[in-house]
Image (spheres, grey):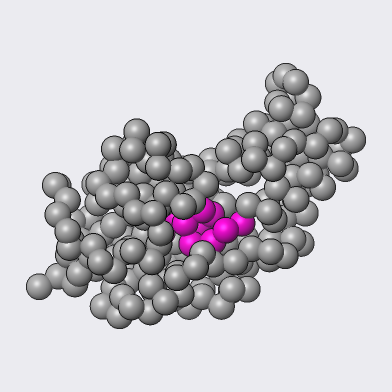
């Protein structure tokens, strides 16, 4: 499909961290608490943010590699993931908020369906979206443990489309990282990158997404209901 604006669609698939929500501080603080409980040195917040997007296990593998200065053992990774999840469940809503304009933008798409497809666990995703008062907006909330595969595999995107009863040619994947864009390509949907998220414009340009916007609130100008 060759993108043209405005693109007719019925379903928006949204990544969570860096797209709908700014969760950088809570993730980084939870990592710091987990490292402290393992008696390891802290890792800079900016580095932690760079490691987000591929699920908790890969996040902790990367953090431990930085903290230790080498590869962590399987037991260290297992323990690190366990502690991080414990801390993040407690602190996932300390400072996390919707990006500016998200709530209003969702309201403006009265004709569309929405789903969340994230590599964060489904339980944590629901906890955060419920805490922010928007969980009811989504016809599906799929986490990294909702299907056998994490993004960039398209399994969660395909499952969301199945649940929402919408075909790929009327679906848009919106995310902030190449992982999201690669998943969208694999699922055969239009892809839209949000550059104010965690990864930035350069990474999105390299991923070959169909459309790059700076802010989430710009979405309504580029999509319309099917005729």
Question: Can I make out residue 73 in this image?
Answer: no
Image x and y of residue 195, in percent: 42, 49
Give the residue drawn at x 25%, y 46%.
210
Q: Is the residue 192 above or below the residue 12 in the image?
A: above
In the drawing, does residue 14 fall left or right of residue 2?
right
In the drawing, does residue 60 fall left or right of residue 86?
left
Check the image and name the residue furthest to the top. 70
Give the residue drawn at x 39%, y 54%.
214
Residue 66 falls in which quadrant of the image? top right
Give the residue drawn at x 38%, y 79%.
107
Residue 82 falls in which quadrant of the image? top right
Give the residue drawn at x 52%, y 47%.
198
In the drawing, does residue 52 fall left or right of residue 7?
right
Check the image and name the residue furthest to the front. 214
Q: In the image, which residues are magenta?
A: 14-23
Identify the main secondary structure in magenta. loop
| Magenta run includes residue 118 | no
Question: Can I make out residue 128 in this image?
Answer: yes
Image x and y of residue 215, in percent: 41, 59
Q: Is the residue 151 above or below the residue 134 in the image?
A: above
Which corner quadrant holds the C terminus?
bottom left
Q: Nearer the viewer, residue 57 or 101?
A: 101
Image x and y of residue 146, in percent: 50, 54
Q: Is the residue 177 above or below the residue 114 in the image?
A: above
């Amino acid at each position: 499909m060759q993108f043209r604006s405005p693109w007719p669609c019925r379903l928006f698939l949204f990544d969570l961290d860096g797209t709908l929500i700014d969760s950088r501080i809570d993730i980084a603080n939870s990592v710091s608490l987990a490292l402290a409980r393992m008696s390891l040195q802290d890792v800079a917040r900016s580095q932690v943010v760079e490691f987000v997007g591929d699920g908790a296990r890969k996040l902790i593998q990367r953090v431990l590699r930085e903290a230790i200065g080498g590869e962590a053992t399987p037991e260290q990774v297992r323990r690190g993931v366990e502690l991080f999840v414990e801390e993040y469940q407690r602190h996932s809503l300390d400072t996390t908020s919707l990006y500016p304009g998200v709530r209003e933008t969702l309201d403006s798409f009265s004709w569309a369906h929405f789903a969340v497809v994230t590599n964060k666990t489904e339980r944590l995703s629901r906890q955060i979206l419920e805490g922010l008062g928007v969980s009811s907006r989504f016809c599906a909330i799929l986490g990294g443990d909702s299907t056998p595969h994490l993004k960039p595999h398209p399994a969660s995107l395909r499952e969301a489309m199945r649940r929402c009863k919408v075909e790929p040619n009327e679906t848009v994947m919106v995310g902030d990282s190449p992982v999201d864009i690669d998943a969208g390509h694999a699922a055969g949907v239009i892809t839209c990158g949000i550059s104010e998220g965690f990864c930035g414009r350069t990474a999105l340009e390299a991923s070959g997404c169909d459309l790059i916007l700076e802010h989430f609130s710009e979405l309504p100008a580029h999509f319309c209901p099917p005729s």
